[in-house]
Amino acid sequence: MLNRRHLRVKVLQALYAYHQSDNKDVKQHEKNLLQSIDKVYEMYIWMLSLISEVVNYAEIDAEERAHKHLPTADDLNPKLKILNNRFILSLMKNEEYLGALKKYKVSWDFDPELAKSLFTILKNSPEYNDYLQKTDDTLHSDKDVIKFIFKKVILKSLLAEQVFEDKFIFWPVDKDVLQALIAKTFKNFSYDDPRLNKLAEVTGNWEEDRQFITDLFEMCIRHDAQYQEMISKKTQNWEPERIAMMDTLLMKMAITEFINFTSVPVKVTINEYLEISKEFSTPKSNSFINGILDKILYELKADNVIKKAGRGLIEE
């Protein structure tokens, strides 16, 4: 699921889009930010659907084999136990999942060859054949073969990768979150009664997380000039064009958290943005951002501007 670091990345992306755009309608950009979170959940639903498509292709494959010109005995008597996979049957009875399929208009009709190619890979794998030979199946063993389909068939497929990249602009960034959501789903689906099995939630506490990202986004924009001045004073020896825009945005986000988020410890804020900089900015950004934030933080503490409470007490 989306943790706070992932959510900060979403805000970073939204701020970058805002500053690059001629449209300065904050509410519209905030709406786009929230939609980017929903896109992660939509991607999750599409992936669950693709897993189901691969499983259900076993029936189509069996029909094609049976109608071959010279079918073998195996062609005429295919092993179709996967069609009774407990995880998939439970998923197809999940009202939230069925509702999401309708909401996002999920259909793989636009690429009928994808499920076929993925099932072919599955059918030829030793792991799948071992599964077909088992006679003591449980919900746990049924989940194991679905995990194999997800991790070793779909995620390893360049064709599937291309489809998701084309459909979801932030696929390279959100892929790890997707894997966490699918893993959480496997954990949640632990009951034989489908009514007890729940889909994963996109965040741990959406009400709190929604407030966090919208506040962070809005405050960064509201105090942009003020925080830019703080940064400029500490980077006078640097030519403005040499400072990466991502670095500036990350520092502004950190300053916003220093001053306005009383429950977020200073150390957590610094560590989070330094880690994000490793992925989204230049190789030297980490040390640069750390140095500038240290200087700004020193002055903010001296001016008694930072007020932290509870777990967020400033450590001297």
Image (tube, rainbow, N blue to C red):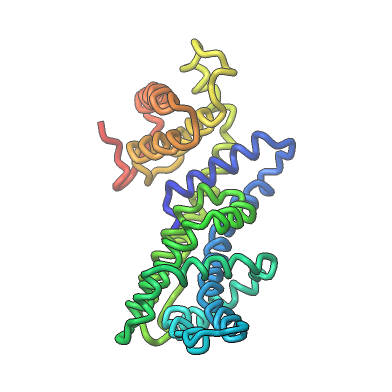
On the picture, is 208 further left or further right than 136? right
Q: Residue furthest left?
A: 316
Name the residue at 37% across, 29% down. 304
Q: Which residue lies furthest to the front in this view?
A: 70
* Quarter of image, res 286: top left
Q: Residue furthest top?
A: 237
Name the residue at 39% across, 40% down. 272
User: Which one is nearer the viewer's eye here, 69 or 314?
Assistant: 69
On the picture, is 177 further left or further right than 106? left
Q: Is residue 275 visible?
A: yes
Q: How many labels does the image show?
A: 0
**Does residue 119 lie above or below 175 as drawn?**
below
Q: Where is residue 274 in the image (x, y as percent from the top left)?
A: 40, 34
**Does residue 285 lie above or below 81 as drawn?**
above
Q: Where is residue 10 in the image (x, y as percent from the top left)?
A: 53, 47
On the picture, is 163 further left or further right than 291? right
User: Which one is nearer the viewer's eye here, 315 or 126?
Assistant: 126
User: Which one is nearer the viewer's eye here, 268 or 258?
Assistant: 268
**Does residue 247 lie above or below 271 as drawn?**
above
- Quarter holding the N terminus is bottom left
Q: Can residue 259 be seen in this view?
A: no
Name the residue at 52% across, 74% down. 52
Q: Residue furthest right?
A: 22
Q: Position of residue 160 (x, y in %)?
A: 56, 59
* Quarter of image, res 179: bottom left
Q: Where is residue 100 in the image (x, y as percent from the top left)?
A: 59, 72
Name the residue at 55% across, 85% down. 71
- Quarter holding the C terminus is top left
